[in-house]
Image (cartoon, rainbow, N blue to C red):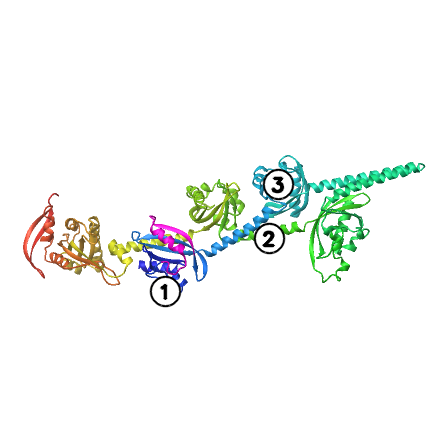
Amino acid sequence: MANERLHAVLEAVPGIVSWVSSDLRYIEVNRHLASIFKLSPQDFVGQEIGFLGTSSEFSDFVRSFFASPPQDAFREISARVNGIERNYLIVAQKYDRGKAAFLIGIDITERHKALDGLRNAEAKYRNIFENAVEGIFQSSPDGYFLDANPALARIYGYDSPQQLIAKVTNISEQVYIDPLRRQEFVQLLADVGRVVGFESQIYRRDGSLRWISENARAIHDEYGNLLYYEGTVEDITERKEAEEALKKFNEQLEIIVEQRTAALKEANHQLVREVAERRRIETALRDSEAGLRALFASMTDVITVFDSQGCYVKIVSTNSEVLYSPTAELIGKSVYEVLPRQQADLFVKIIQEVIQTGQTVNIEYNLPIREGAHCQGAGGHGCIIAEDEQEEFASLKTKEVWFAASVSPMPENRVIWVARDTTERKRVLDALQKAEEKYRGIFENTAEGIFQTTPAGHCISANPALVRMYGYNSAEEVTGNLTDVSNQLYVDPQRRQEFVEAIERYGKVTNFESQVYRKDGRIIWTSENARAVRNGSGEVVYYEGTVADITQRKRSEEALRAEQEKSEQLLLNILPQAIATQLKQNQSSIAERFESATILFADIVDFTGLSARVSPTELVDFLNEIFSCFDKLAERHGLEKIKTIGDAYMVAAGIPMPIPNHARAIAEMALDMQREMANFKRSDGKPFNLRIGIHTGPVVAGVIGIKKFAYDLWGDTVNVASRMESQGTASRIQCTESTYRLLEDEYLFIKRGIIYVKGKGEMVTYWLTGKKYA
């Protein structure tokens, strides 16, 4: 029954199962393994394990396993199955004193593919993150950095993102020159959810001052709780310096013009001096304009001056790409003549807002540009498809170009519009966001838990699957509470040290099984796969990996072991252990000859009369009580109970494991049986009597048949021992001469003499009465 249960379980296992002998040949396989190769299980029996030619790694693993002392081992291998490369986890367990092994293989190909996809997505996201030109950050509501890329570290003057995160613990005080800017930044995010072009002066690490522009958004969880802020930072110091220089030049220009006008009014009568002065002023203006143009030539922004109605007043030539090449044709034109209606409305609205408020406005906008055309006009406006041109250019391909502009007020109801092409930056940010969303999708939705922990044991990242597994409500609760996984998570705190040592030795851990505490104190089983992430100096930054809840599997394994133990115990109650072991390995008949064994038969005298006077239930209960007592005596003396036949009891010594003192053990058993029998009384108060017979000689012992196995003895020795009992007398122990010769030095005997034994003729027998040195 145990064997049938075992096979039923193994056939239900979705993995591959095989039994292999130490000479590397298959003993048996399960149906699942055979079906993979379109074979029957019998096709594997006796074959060398490499006969299919699918994996040399499997053959090497089994060979080295048999050559090594451990009783169990596991390894990941690859195999080519039906033309497809697959990955398996092979678990092996030796048995039969190392002559054979039991192997289970689990197909982990899909998990490998999923992990590879996760790593590729993360690498793609990380590559964009690490190589972006602009600084990228994540900061907590409390005012410290959670993450930063190298560009941000460079902007703030730090050697690495790690140094920036470690050193800057209060952004308000350590970054912003005006600490209130952080409060304004947070308030804007709370009001509208994002900020664009948030300009501030900041301290670099060396104490120098820089201007930055921030674009950011607030990130909330599914319940609307604020998690962190993330965004980009651009160093706009050079642009600010250029704007300041331009403003000063314009102010100087206005002063010069005013001075010239005053001089002309005051000195009309001095025409010669006036002309000379005018020339001097014109020369100064030209020199000033030359300096201004030199400044503009070093800039890559598009600079345009508009009046209050949105007409082009001035276009400053800069060192821009051809997209920004200026032309005199736009001077005097309205934006409605150059731009599509929607963009023109936006330009006029911003221009009038700046003039009315006297404040600089930052704006981000896009324009449709004709591909392949030689673009003319400020901001690429010469290439823009205006509203009245849309039909004419309907067949031309267009592309969308994005600009970030700073619009500042000027005298005479004018504004200066400084625009920069941000198309490439937006493309990078969009790509980064998509990569992050893809990575985040995998991270958030994978069935396995994903984690990151510091070398000190602080959990710094957890996906929803891990949160659920450990019984928490959110990732923030996990990272906030699990600050020492050795003592807070593992039931055995030493497991964390073993986890770290395994990664240091092998570079990773696979199927690292442990018992862990959930938040509610309940204990579960987990299996971890993890690796160490190191910095450029080889130092461990954190450990990351996946976690699977294997509690149900562990329970199933424990239940299976319990069932196996129950079946094993039931089998040992029926058969000797050595015989049971042989039957489990081979169900064919078992027979073995023993040259010397001692057999005892015992029979309850006048039991037939008792059976006629009591009910069947009482009779069985009485026999069970007596024979249970005899079973305990047999176990105490190391004997093998053979069977009961009605009210007769048969026991043997020296089988199935030969012992040198088998006759002495039977003698002790017989004397103890007589003493114990005196405790059982008849209904009339008189004790029961036993008739016992003993004989020593060769026997054949074994199990025959295919159902209802029973261990039995055959041969002349068995027949003679039975005759010693049946031809004995009540309360006496009759022994043959062969038994007497083995015991005469230690035990007391009375010679009965010669009796006739059926099938044997005349035999000399003895009564065993006790022990000499009792």
Q: Position of residue 461 (x, y in %)?
A: 52, 46
| Figure quadrant of the C terminus | top left
Disc nearest the viewer among 1 and 3 = 3
Rendered location of residue 415, percent (x, y): 78, 46
Q: Is residue 761 above or below residue 243?
A: below
Q: What residue is disc 2 on?
A: 434
- Single out the mark in the foreground, 2 or 3: 3
| SS assignment at label 3 | helix
- Would you name the residue on which mark 3 appears? 154
* Amino acid type for the residue under numbered disc 3: Arg
Residue 754 placement (x, y as % from top left): 5, 56
Sequence-earlier tag: 2 or 1: 1
Counting other residues with Cα less than 10 Å from the Cα at mark 1, is it few (<14), some (14-19), or many (20 or more)?
A: some
Magenta residue span:
49-78
Which one is nearer the viewer's eye here, 85 or 107?
Answer: 85
- Using the image as rendered, state which of residue 382 and residue 310 is in the foreground: 382
Q: Amino acid at mark 2?
A: Lys
Judging depth in this view, the residue of 306 and 245 nearest the camera is 245
Is residue 67 found inside the magenta-colored segment of the image? Answer: yes
On screen, residue 226 versus residue 639, left or right, reads right
Quick one: 231 or 601, which is closer to the camera? 231
Q: Quote the CA–CA distance across marks 2 and 1.
A: 50 Å
**Helix, strand or loop under label 1:** loop
- Drawn side of residue 416 relative to residue 713, left or right: right
Left or right: residue 19 versus residue 727 is: right
Judging by the rendered image, the residue that carries numbered circle 1 is 40
First in sequence: mark 2 vs mark 3 = 3
Q: Secondary structure at mark 2?
A: helix
